[in-house]
Amino acid sequence: MVLAQSFQFLPFVLLFITLATQSRAASPEQWRSRSIYQVMTDRFARTDGSTTASCASSSNGYCGGSWKGIENKLDYIKGMGFTAIWISPVIEQIPDNTYEGEAYHGYWPKNYYALNSNFGSAADLKSLVNAAHELGIYVMVDFVVNHYANWGDANIDWAGLTPLNSESYFHPKCWVDWSNQTSAEQCWMGDGYVPLMDVNTEDPNVVDILNNFARNLTATYGFDGARLDAAKSIRKDFWPAFVSATGVYSQGEAWFDDAASLCPYQDYMDGVHNYAMKTHATNSLSGSESMASLAAAMNDLVSQCKDVSLLGSFMENHDNARMASVSSDIAILKTAAALTILSGNGIPIVFYGQEQMLSGSSAPYNRQALWLTGYPTGPDTLYPYFTTLNTFRIHVSTSDNTFLTAKPSYSAPTNNVLSVRKGNTMMYISNEGSKAPSTTLTSTGWPLNTVVVDVLSCQKVTTDGKGNAAVKMSGGLPVVLGLESALVGSGLC
């Protein structure tokens, strides 16, 4: 079986050998300064550039988004200051239109050695990566190595899978019990309609095949980063060799809401999605959790994680509710945006459409076709807001070489306000929304008799002889403070 699979891999290499280049091997240190825009390939942009092509919000099928469509909209992404994109899994999916729809999302693999032709050709994918690199944008690819998929759990065509084409390469069928970590690692996700057959990553032959797959895919297309799907569903000690094989920065999906469970994954991969921040922040912004509790959760991450600057800070993604479904208050939505970019707890990740305030609460409604918005960039959207936030982060990280690795600290100066201190910056956010009364906060720890600026409103305040600044918060909007002298050349305020 191993020889057969090695032979199957050969056509994959030969097919793309003329396109192959060495990976840029972007390191964790290079990724710290990046800001990631997550693209669901099928729902972001079409090759034909249409802004009217049908894609119902309830659709569970392919809508026509493509790699060429992403390439044609890179300027839209760069205009918000994003310096990396994370794209959907690129490999071939099961072709069926199942009871649960089609594999437009990319998480129902069938063949690791072929591309998803619904998104385009090998040349299209390579063209996207090259075009992104020309704009200084890194590309992160999504690896799905925990499972394969099938339409129904009876009479699975094991031989039709590539390269793991035997039932012996998979764990015996059992449905996941998420309260049991052993079950999460050994059992199948999905259900009887679309079971996700769990790959046996204890088998050394399987491990070799997966590592070779990772090495070749990354090098062939020049990807700069690896997103590791379902990282908590595979034994931790599988990941170091796989990450090494990719040769690039890795960030895993380990869906835990507390630092004690989340942080240990950094011993096996570079970073993880910061679900602890996302969960507590969403609760706080929706009013079900205090700002003091959020501050405590954030400080726990700083004290327990190996390197919080390599976590992935997010408030939305393809598996979670849009913030605009949590609240329609513009101040809350701007607060979520500011927390994503400037939380201090890692590399920002913004899910496509957050800038357009898309409001789906669950799949597929949180995966709306972005082209139907027309891609507006004006003040009625969060597009210019993200531009300002990213511009500030880029400026301070390039003008102060200690900023990115500086450990943040969090506190709750009032019941409804969180403060975030990182280096020579300070952010204040409120969970009261637009109804919040204007309030003046005393911001401490600044140089004496020095001008500080809120880069979001351009409010300027001179500190007193003790290094305190009286900062006004209005309408529940975030305040982001930096030294006026440090803003020279930023184009802000």
Image (spheres, grey):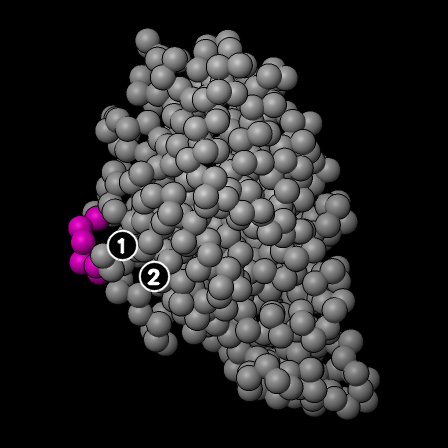
**Main secondary-structure element of the magenta-colored stretch:** loop
Q: Is there a contact, CB below 8 Å, between mark 2 and mark 1?
A: yes
| Amino acid type shown at disc 1 | Thr
Give how far apart the Cα atoms at labels 2 and 1 are: 8 Å
Q: Nearer the viewer, residue 122 or 388?
A: 122
Q: Which residue is mark 1?
A: 47
Instruction: Give the magenta-colored segment's residue range.
Output: 50-55
Is 236 situated left or right of 448 in this image? left
Residue 291 visible to an observer of this rendering? no
Asked if residue 131 shows in the view, the reply is yes
Give 174 or 294, whichever is nearer the viewer: 174
- Residue 375 in magenta stretch: no
At 52% from the left edge and 20% from the top edge, which residue is drawn? 6
Q: Is residue 329 above or below residue 61?
A: below
Residue 142 in the image: x percent, y percent? 49, 41
- Please tell me which residue is depicted at 60% across the width and 22% down the height of the picture: 207
Say few, some or many: other residues with alpha carbon within 10 Å of mark 2 (under 14 / 14 to 19 / 20 or more). Answer: some
What residue is shown at x 36% (from left), y 17% (from top)?
160
Give residue 161's quadrant in the image: top left
Q: Nearer the viewer, residue 473 or 219?
A: 219
Which residue corresponds to mark 2?
A: 72
Q: Secondary structure at mark 2?
A: helix
> What's the amino acid at mark 2?
Asn
